[in-house]
Amino acid sequence: MKFPLSSWCAAALACLFPLAAHAQAPVGEVFATDATVKGSVLLAGGGTRLMSGSSVTAGQATAVLKLSRGGEVRVCARTSISVTSSPSGRDLLLGMGTGDIETHYRLGATTDSILTPDFRIQLSGPGEFHLALGADARGNTCIRSLPANTASVIVTELMGDGTYQVKPGEQVKFAQGRLSAASADVGDCGCPAPPPPILKTEAPAPAEPKKVETAAVTQATTPPPHPDVTASLPPPGPGQVHVEFDAPFVFSGDRPVPPPPSLLRIDLSTVPVLLPAVGPPPAAPAPRPEVAKAEKKKQEKRGFLGRVRGFFASVFGG
């Protein structure tokens, strides 16, 4: 017969930490986006400070409990834990039902305990405890040693006297709440890895033209102003000689004015007319052989008839 988890947690709290109700120091601070915290809490700037005897229920994301003594406990999605500390605040008792948690902290000469519905898992220091633990509704409990873990844990049956040691680098699953049904096939034990960050790229904004370059172009394209010939000269510097002189401008009306230039007249009748050269007419194209032969026969026929006519004319007195 199995008792509810709350009964085991209450009994363990009464046996292990009789003065836990009088502890006033916060156990740690919870950081989560959708977690539910129950019990004695204090609102802080970045999260919620958790007092001894409180509970944390993670939502769809992992909740992180940063311990006041150092390190953290990660409560995986849809998992609930209760947290109780000893009067000194050095020892912790974590109670969990179904779900997964991870421990990431260092212990000195102290001992933490984790209660599941079937087992008590003892973490005795000194050492680094980086562990993943999980339990389901069928009584299957897994323990997986994570990288950087340097300490062993002792697993004890709550309804029996069996014990099991999980050494660093090992992983084990106890089926149906029995240490005798241990296997190395733990499956998914612990919190899932966070998704990789999404990298966003943005097109660089077009650089604005520099004012200095614009001013330089404007100065290069603008013609320089005409010098002011009426302005006075600057004062001479040291060691320079400044000379001024007058140029006389004389006009005399006695001198004769030269006549205007005459126009050149040309008689166009005396200019020879240049005509384009005219060449011989183009030669007539040679007749085709068939046409030349027919013309020759025609001329021969005409010559024969002419001779006949001449003969008859001489005979009959023509």
Image: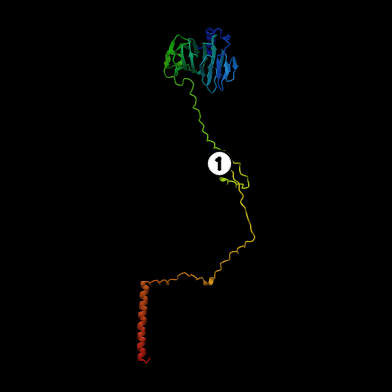
Residue drawn at x 37%, y 81% as measured from the top left = 302
Q: Position of residue 150 (x, y in %)?
A: 44, 15
Give whichever of 106, 266 is nearer the camera.
Answer: 266
Give whichever of 296, 170 is nearer the camera.
Answer: 296
- Residue 295 in sight in this render: yes
Visual colour scheme: rainbow
Q: Is residue 124 left or right of residue 231?
A: left
Callout count = 1
Residue drawn at x 55%, y 41% as measured from the top left = 216
Q: Position of residue 220 (x, y in %)?
A: 55, 44
- Residue 6 in sight in this render: no
Residue drawn at x 58%, y 9% as measured from the top left = 22
Q: Would you name the residue on which mark 1 appears?
A: 216
Compared with residue 264, is residue 149 higher up or lower down, i.e. above or below? above
| Residue type, numbered disc 1 | Ala
* Quarter of the image that includes the C terminus: bottom left
- Please identify the quarter of the rendering in which residue 312 is found: bottom left
- Please identify the quarter of the rendering in which residue 313 is found: bottom left
Q: Position of residue 175 (x, y in %)?
A: 45, 16
Most extreme residue toward the bottom, as rendered?
317
Q: Residues within 10 Å of mark 1 (few under 14, many from 20)?
A: few
Most extreme residue toward the right, as rendered?
253
Compared with residue 99, is residue 273 higher up or lower down, i.e. above or below? below
Q: Helix or strand or loop: what does disc 1 sit on? A: helix
Q: Position of residue 118 (x, y in %)?
A: 48, 13
